[in-house]
Image (cartoon, rainbow, N blue to C red):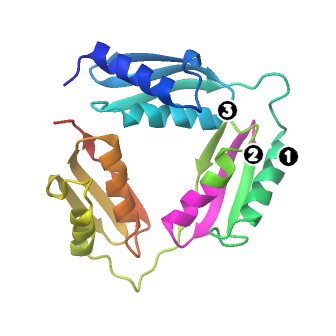
Amino acid sequence: MKTDFELQQDVLDELLWDPSLDSAEIGVSVNDGVVTLSGVVNSYTKKLAAEKAAKRVKDVTAVAMEIDVHFFNGEGKSDIDIAHAGLNALSWSTVVPKDSVTIKVEDSWLTLDGEVEWQYQKQAAENLVKDLQGVKGVTNLIRLKPTPNQSIVKDAIRKALERSADVEAAAINIITEGNHIILKGKVRSWGERNEVEKAVWATPGVVDVKDELIVAPY
């Protein structure tokens, strides 16, 4: 395991390596493997990119986000403009079903609501609006339609995890409660945790995943 100082240097280097970020805008502190990012950036996209960069670093166990989004010199947009831009982006999507998602904007914070069939559609809707100019944050309240005719088979999820070269399937405990999945156990990195979630969300009928996996490098 790295020391906190070594981990801090690695995170700083990763932020510097990311071309979408200005590392001078972001402060990094580390305590027992938990990374805290602070500072001010001028877009929600940069805030997300900073979080992803920190999670890419080996031995990072958690990330606390204290980065604020602030607009300068007319970079901000009115709530009405953001809402119109969001609806326009959704209308051009070939992935998100037409008229399935609604948008609310308050103080530059965008909230998505509605109902779709698949997690990838829910995520696609968020991806379409998170990069819009003037957005300070996104809350995704889109629900997945339950599919009672499709049984969720734990063995199928297990096999999907075992097929992945990036997942140590034996360390993961899968609990099924109807259409809801609970994940317990340990993973080696945030990247592995993300791969587990992707595999579970790809299972037909899953409407909710509660991820209780612990990132514990070993």
Q: Residue at x 54, y 20 (%)?
A: 23
User: In the rendered structure, which amino acid carries the disc numbered 3?
Assistant: Ser
Instruction: Give percent across and percent down for residue 24.
Output: 57, 15
Numbered label attached to residue 130: none
Q: Earlier in the sequence, mark 3 or mark 1?
A: 3
In the rendered image, the residue lying farthest to the bottom is: 149
Residue at (27% x, 61% y) in the render? 164
Task: Confirm whether the magenta stretch covers residue 147.
Answer: no
Span of residues in magenta: 106-126
Whether residue 142 is visible to the viewer of this picture, yes or no, is no
Q: Position of residue 97 (x, y in %)?
A: 66, 72
For marks 2 and 1 on the same chain, the one whose residue lies earlier in the sequence = 1
Query: Which of 94/156 is in front?
Result: 94
Front-lying residue, 132 or 173: 132
Q: Which residue is mark 3?
A: 43
Label ID, residue 105 = 2
Q: CA distance from mark 3 to mark 1?
A: 18 Å
Q: Residues within 10 Å of mark 2 (few under 14, many from 20)?
A: many
* Amino acid type at mark 1: Ile
Circles 2, 1 touching at the beta carbon (< 8 Å): yes
Q: What residue sits right under mark 1 in the picture?
A: 80
Q: Secondary structure under badge 3?
A: loop
Residue mark closest to the camera, 3 vs 2: 3
Considering only vertical position in the picture, is 215 above or below 96? above
* CA distance for labels 2 and 1: 7 Å
Residue ID at (76%, 65%): 91
Mark-to-mark CA distance, 3 and 2: 16 Å
Q: Earlier in the sequence, mark 3 or mark 2?
A: 3
User: Quadrant location of residue 182?
Assistant: bottom left
Q: Is residue 114 magenta?
A: yes
